[in-house]
Amino acid sequence: MDRRAFLGGLALGILGVPRVAPAQPARKLYRIGILGSRAPISAMVGPQPRDAGVIALLRGLHELGYMYGEHFVTEPRSGEGKPERYPIVAAELVRHQVDIIVADGPVLPALKQATSAIPVVMAAAGDPVREGFVQSLGRPGGNFTGLSLQLVETTVKRLELLKELVPGAAPVAVLRSDPAGLISWQAAESAAKERGWKLISLVIRNAGEIEAAFKEAARKRAGGLLVLPIGLLDPHARRIAELAAKSRLPAMYGLRFYVEAGGLICYSADPVEMWRRTAVFVDKILKGAKPADLPVEQPTKFDLVINLKAARSIGLTIPQQLLTRADEVMQ
């Protein structure tokens, strides 16, 4: 074969070989840890969970363009209503080296002890500055950011609403625990002193003391009950609502699910909406933002929810001005 013909044919052969595109780097599959306090773990798993908070988080991520299994998967853990398990499940989740953690308010102290490196988005912290999770709302300064429940301000508002519901000189019993409920108790105590109201402190150390606390409230002739939103009490919402009805004690709660469980009245931000908003923080952090630089959000809307069935069960007439201001009245 002529050498020039051979080289020409070789060149044509090379040009005819299809070019192979350089290999694309595999897309990172983010692992989002979810740490709950009450929900059963079986309700938090996978792309179709049953827990309302986790559903809201996944909906928020979907709205931002994230697809489960394509862009992220979840690693859920839960204390399942047992505060003694919070440190255990927090440490377990940290050991899995997830990329980011979204956490319920009651488990945040355990999570703070477990990690200072993994970004943590607070779904609903009571008072993140006073509790030491962030340096300030505007500049968190560490690995925590997210949403605050404005617990001090809302505790005072709940007390005011309760006194509007049951005016008079009878003292208000406050169901709480230490140290989790200390900040809220101090806020309620300060507000009561300014207004000349009497409070009864009902401190419980474990769920087994709840019934004794109600007996103490009856013995001291409490006219109303303020139940602080703390992790120790939350898993027993239905039992607390039942005991309040049995004691014919008008009770104000800080979380909606108490009213859904049969309680009388609550004033709170929408926890489901707060879980949906955590997706915005997750998105920013996965795209490179640092939790230390992301300001903590505070809710701008609070709902007053009244359960008329619960009111009738204790022979209480809800003042018309409260009914008019209610965002929802359950029949």
Image: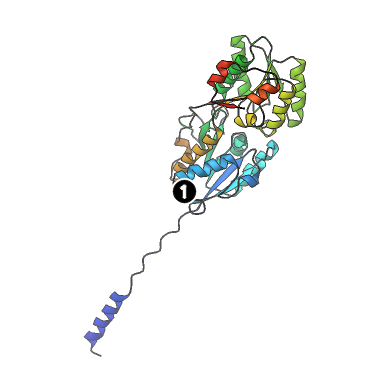
From the top left corner, tell me how far across and down residue 99 is, in percent: 52, 47
Which image quadrant for residue 84? top right
Quadrant where the C terminus sits is top right
Q: Is residue 204 left or right of residue 275?
A: right
Quadrant where the N terminus sits is bottom left
- Residue 78 visible, this orientation: yes
Q: Nearer the viewer, residue 87 or 284?
A: 284
Q: Is residue 225 above or below residue 50?
A: above
Q: Is residue 290 above or below residue 46?
A: above
> Which amino acid type is shown beneath numbered disc 1?
Tyr
Q: Is residue 173 left or right of residue 128?
A: right
**Residue placed under numbered mark 1 in the picture:** 66
Q: Nearer the viewer, residue 139 or 285?
A: 285
Label 1: how many Cα within 10 Å (few below 14, some 14–19, many 20+) = some
From the top left corner, tell me how far across and down residue 162 is, in percent: 62, 18
- Residue at image position (66%, 12%) is 198
- Residue at image position (60%, 39%) is 111
From the top left corner, tell me how far across and down residue 24 is, in percent: 41, 61
